[in-house]
Image (spheres, grey):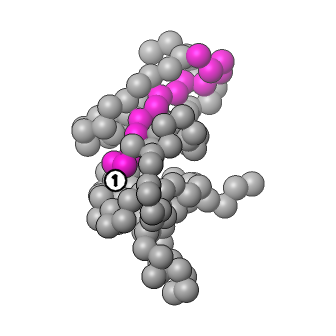
């Protein structure tokens, strides 16, 4: 079992992270432990997923490495991202899964999957 996924972001990006994870995707922000607040970043929880956005000096987005989020209503997630200005790239190469890739506001690659669904769009 995984407790959370951490993604990196550049300094000063907390507002954009909140807009993406809370505003667009509907996650709740979770208070960071007091000892970690000075590091910057923010934490989110929702849809059975916890995401920690950490500030990284010399940040470079993960272009290939990515978390894979199993979600229900994959088309709704795709529409939400597209309406928020994020490109969705469908991929039908994973047997037994429908999936697409998108990126967060910082260029980190994200994968959204729906199991036991026909691969054809």
Q: Which picture quadrant has residue 9?
A: bottom left
Q: Is residue 91 above or below residue 8?
A: above
Q: Is residue 101 left or right of residue 49?
A: left
| Image coords of residue 27 (percent x, y) | 42, 59
Q: Is residue 95 magenta?
A: yes
Q: Is residue 22 visible?
A: no
Residue found 47% across the figure and 81% down from its top:
37
Q: Is residue 12 left or right of residue 40?
A: left
Residue found 47% across the figure and 28% down from its top:
100
Residue where numbered disc 1 is placed: 20
Q: Residue furthest top?
A: 120
Query: How many marks do you count on the picture?
Result: 1
The magenta segment: 93-106
Q: Which picture quadrant has residue 90?
A: top left
Q: Is residue 73 left or right of residue 86?
A: right
| Image coords of residue 67 (percent x, y) | 57, 44
Q: Is residue 102 visible?
A: yes
Q: Is residue 7 above or below residue 42?
A: above
Q: Quadrant of the N terminus?
A: bottom right
Residue found 60% across the figure and 24% down from its top:
97
Residue found 61% across the figure and 59% down from its top:
4
């Amino acid at each position: 079992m995984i407790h959370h996924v951490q993604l990196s972001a550049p300094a000063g990006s907390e507002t954009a992270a909140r807009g993406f994870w809370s505003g667009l995707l509907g996650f709740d922000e979770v208070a960071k432990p007091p000892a970690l607040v000075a590091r910057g970043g923010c934490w989110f929880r929702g849809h059975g997923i916890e995401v920690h956005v950490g500030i990284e000096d010399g940040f470079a987005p993960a272009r290939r490495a990515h978390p894979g989020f199993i979600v229900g209503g994959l088309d709704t997630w795709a529409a939400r991202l597209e309406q928020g200005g994020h490109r969705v790239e469908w991929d039908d190469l994973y047997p037994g899964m429908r999936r697409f890739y998108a990126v967060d506001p910082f260029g980190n690659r994200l994968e959204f999957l729906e199991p036991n669904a026909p691969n054809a769009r």
